[in-house]
């Protein structure tokens, strides 16, 4: 008996010793792996794991597996992680320790990016090495689909969810990732259904329901159901309140902040979201109190204090005390500088941009805010330089440039940038136009971004005013965008401004329900092209509910440029709410018709109930200029100096017009005196500029331009045209010369040097017999150029289209102009 007992005891001791040795070995190896992981020696960790694994994977403790997965995550070893996953799949289902590590491995941004780049249908391909997809595989799939957020991803989620064993739905990881996928893919109904039918609504599931940014009220309601919120749900609650930003949410924030566990007040994420909520709810005092009491201010806390849009100076001041700003902080700093937009902020932007880490320049957010800051501070050259140097040309950055160039009327820059960017590359290489249209349906944010880009492009094309250029670029706009009503309205306006009324009418007629913008654009198109009668008829046919102030302005302007004074009076008298701009347009119409008495009576009528209007007097003065009425012009300018002493720019323009009136009526001495006075004050006259298109290229000419590479040939052609004009009886009108003639000049040389005359000569220089010439001029065409162009069109039997500052002139080969000399 003792011998048997001793034998059994000996066997037990040996087994216990082996288990103890195994446990000690697990702990020792696990600790070694942890030390190596802390030193980022991930490869050595995996080598140690492989050595231990050769004996028996079953002996591997959770501690060793967790460290091995951490190493795979550190070096983005996808295959290594999959291998470990397969080895431990049988013990994974109910393991509360290994499962989170495996999820962390699969959630690594590089891994998710790998899946994302292959689109939703490829998301499951990565699991081809995983036998019998388990809980973690399904969790990862849902996470990947949530990341994509597309309709394809949603369909994939529904398919997998319906085919998944009900046993898996006891796992909060599955439920959380499924709800998150539904919410991120925009299917709130199914997310709520899963949530409501779940018997285990743990905090992570509540968090998934609360995460969607566009449903803050829903997040707040869910939060009120939670008995013991953790840091994640409290953070999401504060974020939801920050989105709404009203007094009601501010009171909720204060209540929750005072009732949550004191330990949560030391959590960085909670504090950051609390600060953000206070700032967004306009309680700067509470935010500053919380911020100042923190002994360890994190970068994210500074960010929360910097985010409020209407406090840029405070944001800049906070930035200056941060020792090591991250990308978010730098982005907020640039945004604050962009809001202020002065030279002081421009210098700050340049200093910070030159000192930040080069890694920051690879961030699309930093680059976008930096380019925006440069544009808003007036440094277009630096913004463009950064854009060209960047390899990361995103839609957001492109939009900033397009909008900025449009704002500064840098139309050629807009078109140049559009030419340089392959917009299909924003959505992937080698996309066909049909693919592009499909992607537009999927990616709503991208769709809106591209609408902005194309609106900017169309506006630039309208400003340049070249028909062939417009045609070539409109072909680049995807069909899905061409059906957008904003694009359609912009195209109606553009075609009207580039001499293609037929295209404008076709687009308008294809719109099922035109709005007031479409109607007004058509009226304006008729008016610009000298078709006043058609503009009036169209106006009278449009539904009354679509008539706006801009509609009245366009139809009255159409009457003004076609000499339809009676029609203008009839429309004007029926307008119930006559605004300043409507009065001004009617004054302009009367003044162009030289009905100055009625125009001044209208001004007096307006002034009975309103303050004097500078634009109204400018319209009257413009009419006096057309009529060469120096007495009226002087009287109007005197009144403008009396009524509007602080309107410096308007007074300078008025003085230039007055000098022109004196010059055109032969009083050169008075004109010279005014110009000397303007020069003394530092006023500058706007330089005449004309654009034309020759062989697909846009050419630009200034008055008396000698910078053109072939200027000798250009002026030789201009002289040839001048001789032909004289042969046909043209007499140069010196009254349109508004400056003293130099000793080496003649009346002919001065007038032949006008920018539109050089543009016409350039067309004939490259093509002896063009059928059509198109020119866009930034100033109003002078009377001599108008008469000369009619004659040139007749002599050379060529249609010449000139859009000046006021209207489009169609000079026909019969020697007539569409404006009927109402210019």
Image: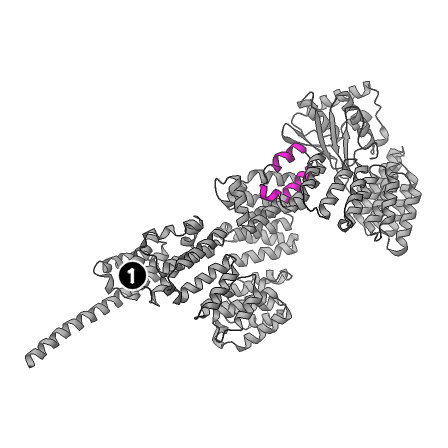
Front in this rendered view, residue 379 or 110: 110
Q: Which one is in front, 782 or 224?
A: 224
Report helix, strand or loop for mark 1: helix
The N terminus lies in quadrant: bottom left
> Which residues fall within the magenta stretch?
455-482
Instruction: Check residue 452 for magenta coloring.
Output: no
Q: Is residue 119 above or below residue 323?
A: above
Residue 469 is a magenta residue: yes
Depicted 437 relative to depicted 283: above or below: above
Q: Is residue 312 above or below residue 496?
A: below
Residue 461 percent coordinates (x, y): 66, 38
Instruction: Give the image location of residue 318, x and y in percent.
Output: 58, 63
Residue 376, x across and y down, in percent: 64, 51
Which residue: 71% across, 30% down? 774
The single residue placed furthest to the top in the displayed view is 727
User: Which one is nearer the viewer's eye here, 584 or 748?
Assistant: 584
What's the residue at 83%, 22% (across, down)? 730
Tell me where residue 486 appears, x and y as whole percent.
Answer: 66, 46
Identify which residue is drawn at 61% across, 46% down.
451
Q: Describe residue 649's horizontal placement relative to residue 75 as left or right.
A: right
- Does residue 733 show up? yes
Please give the residue where the numbered disc 1 appears in the rendered image: 88
Identify which residue is drawn at 30% across, 62% down: 65
Image side of residue 8 versus residue 607, left or right: left
On the image, which quarter does residue 276 sit in? bottom right
Answer whether residue 673 is visible to the viewer in this image.
Answer: no
């Amino acid at each position: 008996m003792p011998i048997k007992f001793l034998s059994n005891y000996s066997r037990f001791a040996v087994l216990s010793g082996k288990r103890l040795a195994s446990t000690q070995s697990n702990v020792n190896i696990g600790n070694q792996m942890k030390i190596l992981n802390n030193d980022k020696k991930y490869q050595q960790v995996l080598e140690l794991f492989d050595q231990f694994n050769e004996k028996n994977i079953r002996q591997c403790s959770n501690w060793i597996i967790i460290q091995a997965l951490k190493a795979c995550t550190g070096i983005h070893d996808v295959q290594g992680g999959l291998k470990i996953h397969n080895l431990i799949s049988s013990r994974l289902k109910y393991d509360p320790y290994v499962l989170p590590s495996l999820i962390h491995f699969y959630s690594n941004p590089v891994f998710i990016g790998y899946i994302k780049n292959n689109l939703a249908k490829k998301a499951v391909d990565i699991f081809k090495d995983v036998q019998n997809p388990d809980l973690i595989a399904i969790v990862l799939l849902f996470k990947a689909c949530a990341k994509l957020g597309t309709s394809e991803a949603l369909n994939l989620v529904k398919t997998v969810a319906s085919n998944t064993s009900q046993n898996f739905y006891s796992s909060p990881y599955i439920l959380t990732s499924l709800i998150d996928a539904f919410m991120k893919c925009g299917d709130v109904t199914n997310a709520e259904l899963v949530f409501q039918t779940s018997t285990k609504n743990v905090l992570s599931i509540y968090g998934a329901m609360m995460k969607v940014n566009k449903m803050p009220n829903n997040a707040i309601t869910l939060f009120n159901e939670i008995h013991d919120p953790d840091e994640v749900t409290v953070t999401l609650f504060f974020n939801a309140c920050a989105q709404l930003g009203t007094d009601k949410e501010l009171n909720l924030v204060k209540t929750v902040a005072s009732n949550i566990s004191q330990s949560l007040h030391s959590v960085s994420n909670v504090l950051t979201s609390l600060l953000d909520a206070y700032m967004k709810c306009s309680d700067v005092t509470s935010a500053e109190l919380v911020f100042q009491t923190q002994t360890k201010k994190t970068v994210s806390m500074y960010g929360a204090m910097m985010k409020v849009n209407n406090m840029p100076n405070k944001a800049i001041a906070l930035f200056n005390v941060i020792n090591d700003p991250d990308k978010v902080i730098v982005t907020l700093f640039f945004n604050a500088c962009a809001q202020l937009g002065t030279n002081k902020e421009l210098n700050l932007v340049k200093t910070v941009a030159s000192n930040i880490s080069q890694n920051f320049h690879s961030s699309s957010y930093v680059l976008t805010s930096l380019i925006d800051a440069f544009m808003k501070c007036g440094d277009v050259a630096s913004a463009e330089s950064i854009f060209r140097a960047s390899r990361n040309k995103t839609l957001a950055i492109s939009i900033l440039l397009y909008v900025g160039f449009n704002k500064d009327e840098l139309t050629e820059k807009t078109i140049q940038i559009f030419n340089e960017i392959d917009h299909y590359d924003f959505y992937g290489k080698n996309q066909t136009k049909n693919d592009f249209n499909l992607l537009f349906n999927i990616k709503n944010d991208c769709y809106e971004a591209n609408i902005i880009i194309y609106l900017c492009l169309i506006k630039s094309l309208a400003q340049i005013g070249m028909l062939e250029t417009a045609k070539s670029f409109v072909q680049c706009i995807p069909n899905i965008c061409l059906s957008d009503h904003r694009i359609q309205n912009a195209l109606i306006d553009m075609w009207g401004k580039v001499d293609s009324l037929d295209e404008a009418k076709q687009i308008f007629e294809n719109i099922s329900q035109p709005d007031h913008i479409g109607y007004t654009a058509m009226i304006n198109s008729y008016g610009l092209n000298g078709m006043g009668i058609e503009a009036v008829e169209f106006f009278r046919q449009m539904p009354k509910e679509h008539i706006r102030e801009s509609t009245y302005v366009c139809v009255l302007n159409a009457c003004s440029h076609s000499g339809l004074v009676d029609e203008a009076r009839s429309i004007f008298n029926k307008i119930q709410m006559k605004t300043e701009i409507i009065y001004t347009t009617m004054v302009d119409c009367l003044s162009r018709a030289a009905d100055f008495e009625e125009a001044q009576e209208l001004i007096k009528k307006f002034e009975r109930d309103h303050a004097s209007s500078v634009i109204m007097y400018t319209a009257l003065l413009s009419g006096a200029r057309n009529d060469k009425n120096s007495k009226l012009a002087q009287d109007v300018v005197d009144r403008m100096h009396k009524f509007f002493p602080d309107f410096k720019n308007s007074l300078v323009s008025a003085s230039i017009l007055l000098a022109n009136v004196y010059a055109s009526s032969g009083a050169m001495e008075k004109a010279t005196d005014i110009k000397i006075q303007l020069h003394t004050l530092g006023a500058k006259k706007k330089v005449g500029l004309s654009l034309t298109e020759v062989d697909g290229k846009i050419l630009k000419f200034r008055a008396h331009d000698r910078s053109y590479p072939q200027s000798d040939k250009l002026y030789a052609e201009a002289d040839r045209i001048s001789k032909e004009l004289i042969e046909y009886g043209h007499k140069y009108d010196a009254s349109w010369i508004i400056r003293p003639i130099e000793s080496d000049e003649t009346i002919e040389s001065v007038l032949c040097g006008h920018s539109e005359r050089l543009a016409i000569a350039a067309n004939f220089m490259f093509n002896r017999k063009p059928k059509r010439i198109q020119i866009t001029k930034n100033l109003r065409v002078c009377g001599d150029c108008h008469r000369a162009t009619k004659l040139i069109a007749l002599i050379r039997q060529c249609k010449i289209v000139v859009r000046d500052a006021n209207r489009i002139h169609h000079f026909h080969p019969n020697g007539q102009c569409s404006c009927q000399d109402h210019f």
